[in-house]
Image (cartoon, helix red, strand yellow):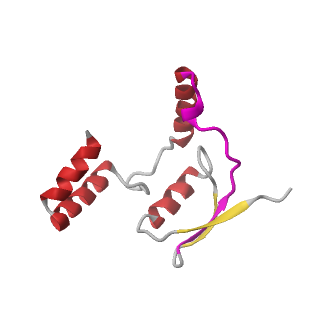
Amino acid sequence: MALKSLVKTGLTDEFSSTTGSATTLAGHGMVRLLDYDQQNAIMLLERLKPGISLRSIEDDEAAIAAAIEVMRKLRRPLEPGHYPFPTVSDWGKGFARLRKQFGEASALAHQRYLI
């Protein structure tokens, strides 16, 4: 049986961290990255068969157990200094850039979603 795949293009600055995390996780708990072209921001990904959403599981304990199973698969020891994922600090820097660009109104708008 042939492996089904799909092509995804990256039009944002998150492309390199996406390929980095997909390479690091190597299909454990997420889709496998089969190949990519960094220069043209194109990824060839394993095609997954859609399952069911955790939101549709009425039993909270079953939904939490399913989420924990995926989280355990995602956990990987990383080499020191090799973190292909954006950190919380990186995300915070993004808010600082928005605040600098748009002023206090931007900060207040984002606080509304963080509360």
Indicate yes or no whether the magenta region holds residue 16: no
Is residue 19 found left or right of 90 in the rendered image? right
The N terminus lies in quadrant: bottom right
Query: Which residue is farthest left?
Result: 104
Residue 99 placement (x, y as % from top left): 18, 60
Residue 101 placement (x, y as % from top left): 19, 67
The C terminus lies in quadrant: top left
Indicate yes or no whether the magenta region holds residue 54: yes
Is residue 91 found left or right of 107 in the rendered image? right
7 above or below 22?
A: below
Total residue callouts: 0
Residue at (18% x, 65% y) in the render: 102
Residue 94 placement (x, y as % from top left): 27, 59
Residue at (83% x, 59% y) in the render: 2
The residue range painted magenta reads: 41-59
> 5 and 106: which one is in front?
106
Residue at (44% x, 57% y) in the render: 84
Residue 50 placement (x, y as % from top left): 67, 46
- Quadrant of residue 51 in the image? top right
- Quadrant of residue 113 in the image? top left
Residue at (24% x, 45% y) in the render: 112
50 above or below 81?
A: above
